[in-house]
Image (cartoon, rainbow, N blue to C red):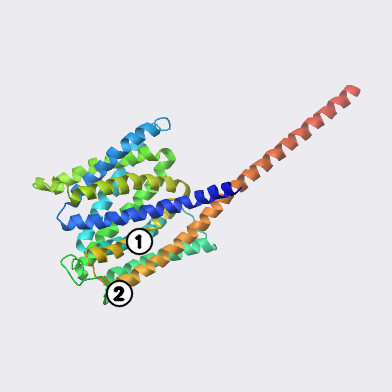
Amino acid sequence: MEEVKKISCMKKAMPFILVILLQVGLAGMDILTKAVLNEGMSNYVLVVYRHGVAAIIMAPFAFYFDKAARPKMTPMIFFKITLLGLFEPVIDQNLFCLGMKYTTATFATALYNTLPAVTFILALIVRLEKVKLRSMRSASKVIGTMASVGGTMIMTLVKGPALDLFWTKGPSAQNTTGTDIHSSIKGAVLVTIGCFSYACFFILYAITLKIYPTELSLTAWICLMGTLEGAAVALVMERGNPGAWAIGWDNKLLTVTYSGIVCSALGYYIGGLVMKTRGPVFVTAFSPLCMIVVAFMSSIIFAEQMYLGRALGAAVICAGLYLVIWGKGNDYKDASTNPTQTKLELIGNEKDSVGHEIINIRKEEEQRTVVETV
């Protein structure tokens, strides 16, 4: 019994563990990406190399493990995969990198805390989420969504005094980027559009999984299409600059390899696994953890200046998102109990129908006996 309880607890905890590890991995990518962008690497080329590495890594696993379970590719599935490759690898990541250039790694990552709120709104539109106004859990999700949006506005528009952290060594060439209000707003607009595209990616990913339920193959396809579409964009944006494609044994190669394996290959795959049972809102609800790690590491590595307005906005966002997580947790409890209740109801209905059939058979036998006696 104890072993069964341990296995059951591990299964319940596994989605949380996977999503937390994913956010820590994304935080590492944000730090490395900011470093290579400061060195002059093209964000368009970075996206191409990153997903090229991910496609090469995932293709053999998808070919071997999904060989028997892989559904037949149809034009509609291919169209959805093409959109998935466009939403996240191309639009989201390029706009996120551009927004990070105008602001800071901490600011760009903190703005991404609106991702669960945007995903929740889109999930309501496509009916992947339901809201009952009289339900406490639904109210918590709505209030949390509103708080996330309000916190984002505070972060964008309110600067406030600088917070002097003991490990910050004063202003530098790296941390002055994005300190003026014009750069902050420009970067915020780019990151927000990228965030919306990322939310669309998660919603479409959840829908595509229902008709193409092989996470490895779907991940490999997304990375491949992201590479091809990103290459087309990079060739246009970096035309006349062949040196932008140069890469050596340096931080650029480390960033490409790390982000390709951890954040694209494993990230899409883990997201698909968790999304099957918990939904897209749950997967995106842990983004504040990434912000905390990035803020801490950026202030140490890049000496980025932290401001009171951004800290207050981030706190409001975190509070709102934990309300969303709480509401989603109760939804999962209901979802885990409803199937059992449904099965019991079905069994009861089957028993009732069998009982009625037995009664009818007995009545027919009694009528036959009466006729034979007469």
Does 223 sit above or below residue 318?
Answer: above
Amino acid bearing label 1: Asn
Q: Residues within 10 Å of mark 2 (few under 14, many from 20)?
A: some
Question: Going by the image, does 338 lie left or right of 206?
Answer: right
Residue at 45% of width from left, 61% of height from top?
Answer: 324
Q: Position of residue 326 (x, y in %)?
A: 48, 61
Task: Determine if residue 125 is in view.
Answer: no
Question: Going by the image, does 171 lie left or right of 277?
Answer: left
Question: Going by the image, does 233 lie left or right of 357?
Answer: left
Q: CA distance from mark 1 to mark 2?
A: 17 Å
Does 312 sit above or below residue 367?
Answer: below
Amino acid bearing label 2: Leu
Residue at 37% of width from left, 49% of height from top?
Answer: 202
State the residue position of label 2: 308
Q: Position of residue 119 (x, y in %)?
A: 39, 55
Task: Determine if residue 59 is in view.
Answer: yes
Secondary structure of the residue carrying numbered label 1: helix
**Labelled disc at residue 13:** none
- Asked if marks 1 and 2 touch (Cβ < 8 Å), the reply is no
| Residue that protrudes farthest toward the right in the picture | 374
**Labelled disc at residue 113:** 1
Indicate which disc, 1 or 2, sits on the residue closer to the N terminus. 1
| Residue that protrudes farthest toward the left in the picture | 240
Q: Quadrant of residue 321?
A: bottom left
Q: Quadrant of residue 31?
A: bottom left
Secondary structure of the residue carrying numbered label 2: helix
Q: Residues within 10 Å of mark 1 (few under 14, many from 20)?
A: many
Does 10 sit above or below residue 135?
Answer: above
* In this view, the mark in front (1 or 2): 2
